[in-house]
Image (cartoon, grey):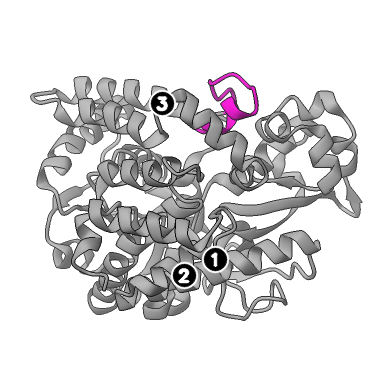
Amino acid sequence: MKIALLGGGGFRVPMVYEALLARAGGLGLEEVTLYDVSGERLAQITPVLEGLEQELGECLVFRPTTEIADALEGADFVFCAIRPGLLEGRVVDERVPLDVGVVGQETTGPGGICLALRTVPAMVELAEAVGERAPRAWFVNFTNPAGLVTEAIQGVLGGRALGICDTPSALCSRVANALGRPSAELWFDYFGLNHLGWLRGVFDGERDLLPELLADDDLLDSFEEGRLFGGEWLRSLGMIPNEYLYFFYFASDTVGALRESGSSRGEFLLRQQSEFYAGNGYTAVEALAAWRRARRERDRTYFAEARTAAGLPESHEDAEQSGGYEAEAIAVVEAITGNEGRVLILDTANRSSLPFLDERAVVEVPCVVGRAGPVPTAVGSVPGHARALMETIKEVERTTIRAALEGSAELAVQALALHPLVPSVNVARGIFEQYASRHRELAGRFQ
């Protein structure tokens, strides 16, 4: 088996490689290619991977390359995590709306729209290369905003493209821990779009355990989402939202916290990762140690803006409870190659899972995954406020995809103005003007 990893110089690549090292024998994995447009970033990540091999006493044949055709030729699976504009672009995505009192976040609100405007054309181009060089490969997308991007590339690759995110599985794992039950024994009734989902039931056979969890403030206080949203609001909803819904339910609180902090998440990561990538001459052991130091700080401060707004400690106490998106990706490979029929929460075409959305809409729901790929389970009707928000955001996503592919400033402004977090058309116009003036990727493309 060959896996091509696009965005192979990215900071999170060692997490994926470590997971592949652990499973290589069972998967029959023979080769991993790491593709990146930056040979310098590949050169900085390579010794980290060598350090992992030395530490674990395992090795794979991995090849860094800046040639996309070389990376893809003969691949069985393509993992993709790219960031056009790098972290410098994320800083702009977050800072521009924040300066006018709107949530500035990487995937939610204007920041996610601007990221998508840069990312969709690049991802469609990569998907076309996959269709030409590795037409039988499964395209496993990690690139944010994951659901929107997956819908865009399904226009090229169809159902062989799917999206993954570790947010739903992390929520389910934390809820299972709070209940004192192994996740494998439970069915999680989860539904939504990427970074816009709700857990509305936790079933042990016919019995739903969620009501007793919602009624117990001590249990709710034992995990991240319970502390973040608070028992009163969760009981009002009758569900547990994933953490990204904090930006919708407590938007002004988040803006206030970010303004008081003086630094966005993107600005923090840019400072931190610039130091890592600036390192030269590391041995494999030194490179792995430097990467791990940076990763620990990254994980500890994940979602700090929302926790600060909620009056919680900045440190993310649950940061290491989930397996990360690398575990989700490996689970997909195992389920498809082994025809397992494993249930995974993935981003894939709706078919008829959520009947109020059309069959092509990419949704994030439990899927049965086997040789034919993910088959979404039937979710059925959902609470009215969740349906309304999902329908609105799906329209925003599709308008953003059209804007990105057509290079239309008019559609880009429309997508921003339709988003619930943007208070007016004039604010949307001002945000887009700032984005276009500060992102060279947008300046020449949008008319």
Quadrant occupied by the N terminus: bottom left
Quadrant occupied by the C terminus: bottom left
Q: Residue at x 52, y 67 (%)?
A: 396
Q: Which residue is mark 2?
A: 414
Q: Is residue 162 visible?
A: no
95 or 390: which is nearer to us? Answer: 95
Label 3 to label 1: alpha-carbon separation: 28 Å
Q: Earlier in the sequence, mark 3 or mark 1?
A: 3
The image shows residue 390, relative to residue 282, as above or below, that is below
Queried whether the magenta region covers residue 379, the answer comes back as no
Is label 1 in a helix, a strand or a loop? helix
- Residue range (magenta): 302-318
Identify which amino acid the numbered label 3 is placed on.
Gly
Q: Which residue is mark 1?
A: 418
Sort mark 3 into few (<14), some (14-19) or many (20+) by Cα contacts within 10 Å: few
Q: Quadrant of residue 116?
A: bottom left
- The spot of residue 423 in percent (x, y) is 56, 55
Residue found farthest to the front: 426
Q: Which residue is mark 3?
A: 262
- The spot of residue 313 in percent (x, y) is 59, 18
Identify which amino acid the numbered label 1 is placed on.
Leu
Q: Residue at x 25, y 62 (%)?
A: 442
